[in-house]
Amino acid sequence: MPKVLQQKAANGEIYLFSQGKRKRLANGKQTTAKRISYGKLLADGSFCPNAYYESLPVAEKIALGIEKHPKPSLLEQQLSKTSAATRGRPKELLQGFRKAYGDSYLFMQIAQQLKIIQLLKQYWPNSWDKLLSIAMFMTINHADSLYQLQPWSRTHTVPACSGLSSGNLSRLLDAMEEDDRQRFLTDWAALRPSEDTYCVDGSSFSTMSQYLRSARWGSNKEHDPYEQFNVLVAFGNESHLPLFISSHSGNIPDVSTIEDFAHNMYGMDIRNTEFCFDRGFCSVTNITTLVKRGHRFVLAARSLSVGYIKHVVKQVSLADLVTLSSYNDEKELYGITRESTWTYSVNGEHKKKASVPLYLHIFYNPQMALDKQKHEFSLIKELQRELRTKPDRAHLNLYEKHFTIDWGEQNPYKKPEYDAQKKKRKRPPLQPPAACTVKSNNSVSPRQFEDGLFVLLSNSQQDCWEAHRRYKKRWSVEKAFVNLKTRIGIRRIRSGQQTVVDSRLFIAFISLILVSELEKRMADASLDSALMRKYTLELLLKEFGSIDQYHYASKARHVTPITKKQKKLYDQLSINPPARTMTDAEQAACDFD
């Protein structure tokens, strides 16, 4: 309890109070301490309590030490006069409830089949049920914040029966250790098939707190006016399940995260695995890092003018690429493969070199080249009309790029003159030039040929179409970020503690596993079932959410009637429908209590 202080007022009365601790802000200033008043001492030495002190329980009054024998509060006096037998409902009825059960049962069975519950029990034996309850809440009721979990659990069946208040959840997330999270990710990666390939991508997440050590101003893709931190996710192409998640500072670009990602893969004992990267990760250092770590990769080239790509692309002409043998009618692309050699220094020694084969898959899309050419022609026509009517100084660079212009007597780059009357610099408006001609008709085929090119680099895939197929599956990791930001609802993090943010990202990773597995099963079932094709994820959870469960003390639990359509949906998702009646032992086997 806080220490009780005394302060003598101007009228001679002595007031008793306690004072909290001050906090130092980021600007160096301190906050005002919160003061709690308990009453005052009269002239005869007796204590006169205020209303706040009288409402305190007897135990807290004794801990303060103001009175030796304090009186109980009004509420304690009323409860002592009321008989326990006549107060409230009977005890056996207090344990009765009716809660939504079908959607929670669905995710619990998925978590059990994927061995998520087994891993959570292994590293958090005392709080695994609360962690899984948070993950299920973020998956089913994604629109609300975590402080709504406790009232939501009163109407939905969750693994944890208690301890879901906002304060308990904050302490739980703050107590999670980084070592346990990394061990969980290592064991989870060991369960994934070794032949699977993974797409890696990053995205920015906004935060409203300025006290996170990873919060920085960076390139925010959602254009939120907040600081951000970046999240890197590896997602399986074949399993359609996430493998790994990590966070970085908001001012670190994607191209600088591969070194840290390779170290994490080495620490998780993930080797000889194939990864697909977007062009934002392409650099000489990253390719060398992936080669040294022994990873197989498919990487999109950032630019065709880079040295190690330029000399290969220059040797390929339009006649070599646009042939019948290189055309794929399904993808409507031309593609060829050129083998090259990647040379790098061993252990940082410039004298000792090593080399590995590197395959450059060059693709040509004539439609993309035509669209870019049309866009450039439209831009030139628009600039030409603008020059003849009302030139804009903001487009001077574009004018000089596409036109040969005679401005006459006016100088568009002249510094503005200072207007002493208005106390500001005045720049006269631009007038149409005396002469204007287009530098080129832009009908040259080499430029159009480069506009339709894109290159994939790989050290494992020798077939260009197989590399293209694996790279096109990058939509899975993009969809994973959509689920994280919309369905799971962590686009903006409001917590101010770094440990809590890291724990929330980890639980969001578990929610992403559950959502991804359910979407995969729905997609597989939709191939053969017309019934499943009628359902989206929202409609499916709404269909299962109509199944309720009744429970009364010392009696078997029973579930509301399940329709034939609901049973068929459960079967198509490879999950046994819930039993109509379950004893406590059977319910414990389902890991709900």
Image (cartoon, rainbow, N blue to C red):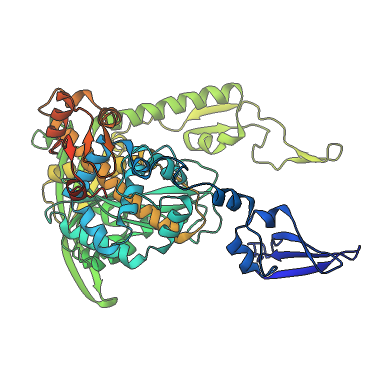
Q: Is residue 28 left or right of residue 576?
A: right
The answer to whether residue 474 of the structure is visible from this angle is: no
Q: Residue drawn at (64%, 62%), measured in percent from left and top?
A: 25
In the rendered image, the vertical position of residue 300 relative to residue 39, given as above or below = above
Give percent across and percent down for residue 507: 34, 52
Res 400 seen here: yes
Q: In the visual, does 234 lie left or right of 196?
A: right
User: Residue 199 at what x, y percent from top left?
Assistant: 24, 49
Q: Is residue 295 above or below residue 374?
A: below
From this viewpoint, which residue is outermost toward the left?
325
**Quadrant of res 155:** top left
Q: Name the side, left or right, on which 277 lies relative to 531.
A: right
The number of callouts visible is 0
Q: Residue, x 28% and y 27% (percent of image)?
A: 539
Residue lying at the far right of the rendered structure: 11
Residue at the image point whose x is 36% and y is 48% from the top: 134
Compare residues 145 and 302 and report the one nearer the observer.
Answer: 145
Residue 152 location (% of width, % of height): 40, 40
Question: Quick check: 170 left or right of 395?
Answer: left
Q: Quadrant of the image for the N terminus?
A: bottom right
Q: Nearer the viewer, residue 392 or 447?
A: 392
Front-most of 499 and 112? Answer: 112
- Percent x, y of residue 481: 34, 43
Task: Answer with the quarter of the image where residue 323 lies.
Answer: top left
521 or 96, which lies in front? 96
